[in-house]
Amino acid sequence: MSTSNRNSRPLMMMTSILVVLLGGAFLGARVVHSGGQEGGHLQPVSFKTAVSPPAPVSLAQFKDGFASVVDPALAAVVNISSTKVVKRPDMPNIFDDPFFRQFFGNQFGAPNSGPTAPQTEKEYALGSGVIVNSEGYIVTNNHVVAGATDVQVFTPDKQKYTAKVIGTDPRTDIAVLRIQAHGLPTLTLGDSSKLKVGDIVFAIGDPLGVGETATMGIVSATGRGLGGAIEHYEDFIQTDAAINPGNSGGALIDARGDLIGINTAILTNGNGGGNEGIGFAIPINMARRVMEQIVAHGKVVRGYLGVNIQSVGPDMAKAFGLSHGGGALVANVTPDGPAAKAGLQRGDVILSLDGESVNGPDDLSVHISELAPGAVAHLKVFRDGKDLEFSVTLGEYPAEGPAGAGAESGGGSQSAGLQGVQVQNLTPSIARQLNVPATTTGVVITQVEPSSPAASAGLRQGDIIQEVNHKPVHNVAEYSSAMAASSKQPVLLLINRGGSTLFVVISPE
């Protein structure tokens, strides 16, 4: 039996910058979903909430330090150790190899004895958690307990408990645990919507397994999204409070001692994966909604709009006739989905939801996810130079299906007007390789020069160009004609990638 210790899970972000989830995640582990039931009946759970609106805090009261804020919080932050038993892939039996037998014969067993028996090993993850209810309910990160077969909780008073995973939500990286204990110290849930850049915050957890630690910093940004680099729904609090691997699931508290975030990830340049002063926490308002659903239903139910969306930068805004960037561009509309039934179309730019401005795709996704299925979302949409109003009755977010696989295809001819890109006609055979319907139309990109503007804009081999400046193209001839007509101006392309569509603007050098 071998063991391995994994204290962080990196994801590539930019050239040399990594996003590191702060707990010991199991790489490639499946999500644990537990029913959230006690004795067959769901139990109501209450969380202590701060008085609203919060009273102003004077820094004068902290002339002797911040112990009055930190000390009460330390008792409610726990250490979490989780274990997963995994099987290593079956290994071929080397004793069956003819070359081996030429020298050693059958002394190690008869031929064709098959692969060796699979070996098992234990993987360990370390993280933190926050007691949010005196009857043993703890919130932490999903990646701290994902796939775990055993979860142990260690409280600051040196007590050890075996925890039950009540439920998890991978899309926000929230998990709820319960231990059999009563009268536990808890943290009061604050209001993360009131946070402002510059507010003092404290991060509490068990970084790198050294023991419970508190660090201080400020709120560096709110509403931070990284385009899905960390989670499906991103609305992070960014802070420079020192947090490191092992802090996952720990508390981010304000100067009142209220819980305003759950620490989850850091940005690092890859030199050891340590603190660089750019950390992220899940806002407690988002975490609370998830916790309440997990405890009440054992799962999270979300509203569903039925669109793929992307950001609108200055070039994209100009291509669609907008005076400035912002909003969420509809790149694809799910057939028969809520948005399609309400009349939304590909190329629409969603500007506001229920009277509140939409700043970008993450903003829209998070707010739609907070609405219940059956709720009516009132959208303001920009289309063909006009503002339109739509009322969409939301569906329920479906279970995620397998992602379409991309493929690369060689050969083709040089197009007119799009430097560094080669395309060829899309045939039914190529369409099957690219995992798109055989009826899909357009031209397939067979080569993209790495130094070209197209590569900088994100075009790839295997992308299917279906429109040029809103004009459909069905073959290389139509594509070349449309590109030639664009002259030296920026060109707007509609791309089909693995069955999903998106818009790309390419500016000439």
Image (cartoon, rainbow, N blue to C red):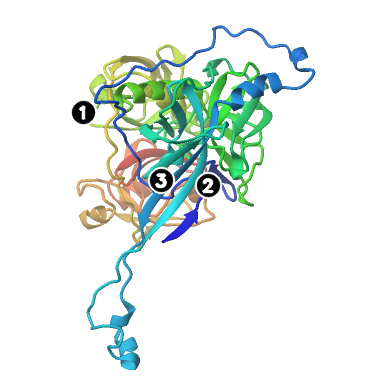
Q: Which residue is mark 1?
A: 336
Mark 3 closeness class: few <14, some 14–19, many ≥20 residues within 10 Å: some
Taking the spot 47% from the left edge, 31% from the top edge, the residue there is 234
Residue 56's place in the image compared with 149, above or below, is: above
Q: Given the image, on which type of amino acid does mark 1 rest?
A: Asp
Which label belongs to residue 8? 2
Residue 113's place in the image compared with 496, above or below, is: below
Q: Given the image, on which type of amino acid does mark 3 rest?
A: Met
Q: Is residue 303 visible?
A: yes
Which label belongs to residue 12? none
Q: Outermost residue, right direction? A: 63
Query: Can you give x and y, in whole percent of width and height, for residue 323 in the image?
Result: 51, 23
Q: Quadrant of residue 394?
A: top left
Taking the spot 41% from the left edge, 32% from the top edge, the residue there is 175
Q: Quadrant of residue 109?
A: bottom left
Task: Give whichever of 319, 305 is nearer the camera.
Answer: 305
